[in-house]
């Protein structure tokens, strides 16, 4: 059974924002990667500064895309500061989960799986609760 009243359609509608948030995350991962490759291959900078640039470009694009498509709220400086703080907290979570997996002597892919399963959902929940909890 398909259509707008099907269980799958209702499930997708209920989790639309999380799905859009995930799609924006995938696109911004590609944007980050493309920025790193472009900066390094053009000899503008080495890998570390290129990753800083990649993060800056992707984080900014993610902010505007999530304002518009995920949460339907206007951008503001206050909101961007909160968005950046949540992004940096997500980075700390990524490092922490990777370190935990390493400390437990798990294969590095187990740590990556933890990051991929926990990171986006927690980041979405934090953005929903703090960054986009109310209009600017």
Image (tube, grey):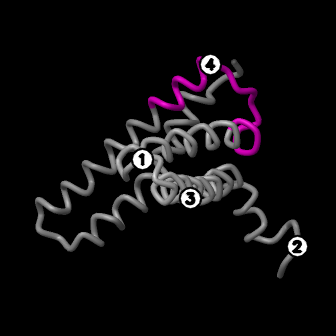
Please tell me how crowded label 4 is: few (under 14), some (14-19), or many (20+) other residues with Cα within 10 Å.
few
- Image quarter (top left, top right, bottom left or bottom right) of the C terminus: top right
* Residue 105 x %, y %: 11, 68
Residue 80 point in image, percent of width and height:
58, 26
Q: Nearer the viewer, mark 4 or mark 1?
A: 1
Where are the magenta residues, as a range?
Answer: 67-85
- Between disc 1 and disc 3, the foreground one is 1
Is residue 86 left or right of 28 when viewed as pictured?
A: left
Dot 1 crowding, Cα within 10 Å, few <14, some 14–19, many 20+:
some
Disc nearer the start of the sequence (1/3):
3
Front in this rendered view, residue 63 or 127? 63
Name the residue beneath numbered marker 2: 3
The image shows a total of numbered marks equal to: 4
Report if residue 28 lies within the magenta region: no
First reached walking from the N terminus: tag 4 or tag 1: 1
Residue beneath the point at 87% across and 66% down? 4
- The residue indicated by pointer 4 is 77
Mark 3 or mark 2, earlier in chain: 2
Numbered badge on residue 34: 3
Alpha carbon separation for disc pair 2 and 4:
41 Å
In the rendered image, the vertical position of residue 35 relative to residue 52, given as above or below: below
């Amino acid at each position: 059974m398909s259509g707008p009243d099907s269980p799958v359609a209702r499930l997708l509608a209920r989790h639309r924002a999380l799905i859009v948030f995930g799609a924006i995350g995938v696109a911004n991962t590609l944007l980050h990667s493309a920025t790193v490759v472009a900066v390094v291959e053009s000899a503008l900078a080495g890998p570390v500064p290129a990753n800083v640039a990649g993060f800056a470009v992707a984080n900014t694009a993610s902010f505007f895309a999530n304002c518009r498509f995920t949460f339907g709220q206007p951008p503001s400086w206050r909101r961007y500061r909160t968005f950046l703080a949540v992004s940096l907290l997500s980075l700390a979570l990524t490092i922490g989960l990777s370190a935990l997996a390493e400390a437990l002597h798990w294969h590095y892919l187990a740590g990556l799986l933890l990051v991929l399963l926990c990171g986006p959902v927690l980041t979405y929940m934090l953005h929903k609760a703090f960054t986009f909890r109310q209009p600017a």
